[in-house]
Image (cartoon, rainbow, N blue to C red):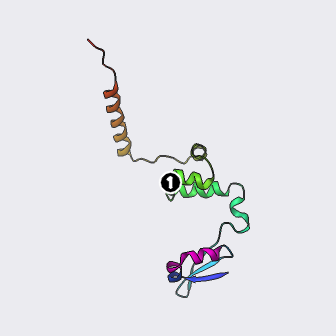
Amino acid sequence: MHAVSVSGLKNNPAEALRQSKQGMVVVLNRDHPDAVMMGLDQGGLLQAPGVRAALATALFRDGELSLARAARVAEMDTSAFISHLSRLGIPVIRLTEAETNADLDTLEQWLESSSVTPAL
């Protein structure tokens, strides 16, 4: 186990990440243990079935990753990841009511302008 201060983490995050690959790293805020970092590759954790998908799903659901990036983390193509999210009831597109109404208005305008008017 390693320890790093908050300022040490801020000044050299790469060192703390390297240390987390060898064992847990405790982040100290003054003399108070504040957080623990651990490398996900330790013990093959990322290779365990479902771990990558679960991690990517949670990060996407919480708005931390885009759809495309979450799919890459899950090691799925985007359409498979969308299906995965759908099975879990997680919305892929998040729009407010105002955004949805604006999109519908735009679609209606486009449909009206692209419709063929019979020649007289």
Q: The C terminus is located in which quarter?
A: top left
Q: Position of residue 48 (x, y in %)?
A: 72, 58
117 on left or right of 69: left
Residue lying farthest to the bottom in this orientation: 31
Residue drawn where x is 64% and y is 77% of the image: 19
Residue drawn where x is 64% and y is 74% of the image: 20
Q: Look at label 1 and name its amino acid.
A: Ser
Magenta range is 9-20
The answer to which quarter of the image holds residue 83 is top right
Q: Position of residue 55 (x, y in %)?
A: 61, 58
Q: Which residue is mark 1?
A: 66
Q: Position of residue 62 (x, y in %)?
A: 51, 58
103 on left or right of 49: left
Residue lying farthest to the left in this orientation: 120
Magenta segment's dominant SS is: helix
Residue drawn where x is 35% and y is 29% of the image: 111
- Look at the picture and state if 118 lies above or below 115: above
Residue drawn where x is 57% and y is 43% of the image: 79
Q: Badge 1, how many Cα within 10 Å: few under 14, some, many 20+?
A: some
- Look at the picture and state if 82 lies above or below 111: below
